[in-house]
Amino acid sequence: MTDSESGATAGAAARSRRGGKRERLVAAAVQVFHQQGVEKTTLADVARAGDVPLGNVYYYFKTKDQLVEAAVDAHCDQLTTLTARLDAVPDAAARLKALIAGWVEQRETAARFGCPFGTLATELDKRDDGLDQAAAKVMRTLLDWVERQFTELGRPDARALAVELVAAYQGMSVLTNTLREPGLMADQGNRLQSRIDDLAGR
Amino acid sequence: MTDSESGATAGAAARSRRGGKRERLVAAAVQVFHQQGVEKTTLADVARAGDVPLGNVYYYFKTKDQLVEAAVDAHCDQLTTLTARLDAVPDAAARLKALIAGWVEQRETAARFGCPFGTLATELDKRDDGLDQAAAKVMRTLLDWVERQFTELGRPDARALAVELVAAYQGMSVLTNTLREPGLMADQGNRLQSRIDDLAGR
DNA sequence: GTCTATATCAAGATAGAC
DNA sequence: GTCTATCTTGATATAGAC
C-alpha cells in the first residue's frame, strides 16, 4: 500500500540500499504538511526538511500527489503501531484512557498546528485527488478500534460512543488550535477521562 | 471592521452606488473558500463566482489577503445575525437547542465541505497572515454566547460546557466531512439535544 | 541512483485603455 | 469605476550530465 513498486520485500531491500532517503522524505512530508498544510508546502520545502536535493525527490515520487499519498499511508502505519501498543494494556477502559492521555500529551503541538491527522483529512477533502478516501479509511480504522473497546466494556451503543469520543478529540483540537490554548485540551482531556470512568461503571 | 475605507456610512453609500459588486465578491469568496479551501482558490475562481471580471477584483481588494479578511469579517457578521435571532427565543435551553438544530440542518453541506467556519479557521492557522487572530475572535464570540446561555441555566461550569458543545460540533463536522456521512451529524445532534435537556434539568 | 539546470505553466498583481 | 492585456514570480516537473 505504501510501496508503489513490485514486491514488498524487494521494495524494502531497495530502500535500505538507498540509504533511507525515501523514508526521510516521507517523514519530512508528514511533519511539514502538518505544520504548513499540504497546499502551502512546496516540494522544495519537503526536500530541504528531508535533506535531499529537490530534483532527487522526483526519483522517489513522480508527482506531489504521490508524496501526499505516502504521507497518508505513514499516518495509517502510525495508527496501527499505536493501537498495537495500546492492545498490550489489559483493561479496555485503561486502553481508552491511555489513548486520551496520548492526545493530551501532544497539546502543545495541537495548539500550534492542530491534530496531525485531522487537519490533513480536512485539507484532503478539498482536493481533487482521491486521497480523501484514504483519509476516511484511516479515520474508520480509529473509530473501529475505539468501538471495540466500548464493546468490550459491554456498551451496546459502542459505535455512537466511539464517534462521540473521536469527535470530541477532533473538536477540541480545532478549538485548541484556533484559540492557541493548550490548556483547553488538558481540561477537555480530563473531562473525557472522567466520562470513560463513568461509562466503564467505575 | 469590514470596511477598509474611511467612514462606515460613506463606505456603505459608495458600495450601493457600485451596484454591490463588493458584496457579490465577498459572498462569492465565502462560498468558494468553503468549497475549495483558501489556498486552492484563485482570484479568478472568486471573480467568476461573483460574476465580476478578474482585473476588477483588484479595484476592491488590493491583495488576496484582504479578500480573505473580508470573508472572515463576513463570518463574524453572520454569527452576530444568528445569535441576535436566537436571542429572541425566550428560554436559554431552547436557544441552545435551536443553535444545534441549525447545525444539523446544514449536515449535507458539512458532509461535503465541513463546517464553513471551522475549516476556514483551520486553514488560516497555517498561513503567515495575521488572520488566525481574527478567526480566534469569531470563535470566542460563539463560545461567549454559548457560555452565557449555560450561565442563564444556572450552571457554574458554563465555560467548560460551552467549550464542550462547540468542540462537539467542530468534531462531528470533521468526522461527517471526512467520512462523507451526513447521518453522523444527525445522530450526534440528537445526542447534544438530549444533553442540553439533561443539563437544563428537564 | 544522484543531482543541477531549466522548461513550463499557473496565479497574483499591475498598467493603462476605455 | 470598469475591464483587458500583460508582467512577474514561484512551483511543478523534466532533461540530461555525472
Image (tube, coloured by chain):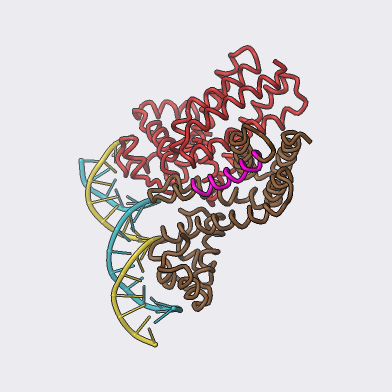
Chain colours: A red, B brown, C yellow, D cyan
Q: Is A64 situated left or right of A173 in this image? A: left
Residue positioned 49% across, 46% down in the render: B136
Residue B68 spot, x, y in % from top left: 46, 57
Residue B12 spot, x, y in % from top left: 50, 71
Along the line of sight, the residue nearer the viewer: A45 or A109 = A109
Q: Is B123 situated left or right of A158 in this image? A: left
Can residue A70 be seen here? The reply is no
Residue positioned 69% across, 51% down in the render: B102
Residue positioned 49% across, 30% down in the render: A183
Q: Main secondary structure of the magenta part?
A: helix
Residue positioned 45% across, 28% down in the render: A10
Can residue B121 be seen here? The reply is yes
Along the line of sight, the residue nearer the viewer: A14 or D6 = D6
Residue B138 spot, x, y in % from top left: 52, 49
Residue B44 spot, x, y in % from top left: 46, 66
Q: Does the magenta stretch include residue B145?
A: yes
Along the line of sight, the residue nearer the viewer: A93 or A138 = A93
Q: Does the magenta stretch include residue B139?
A: yes
Q: Is B16 situated left or right of C2 in this image? A: right
Specify start and end residues of the magenta stretch as a single range: B136-151
- Residue most toward the top? A90
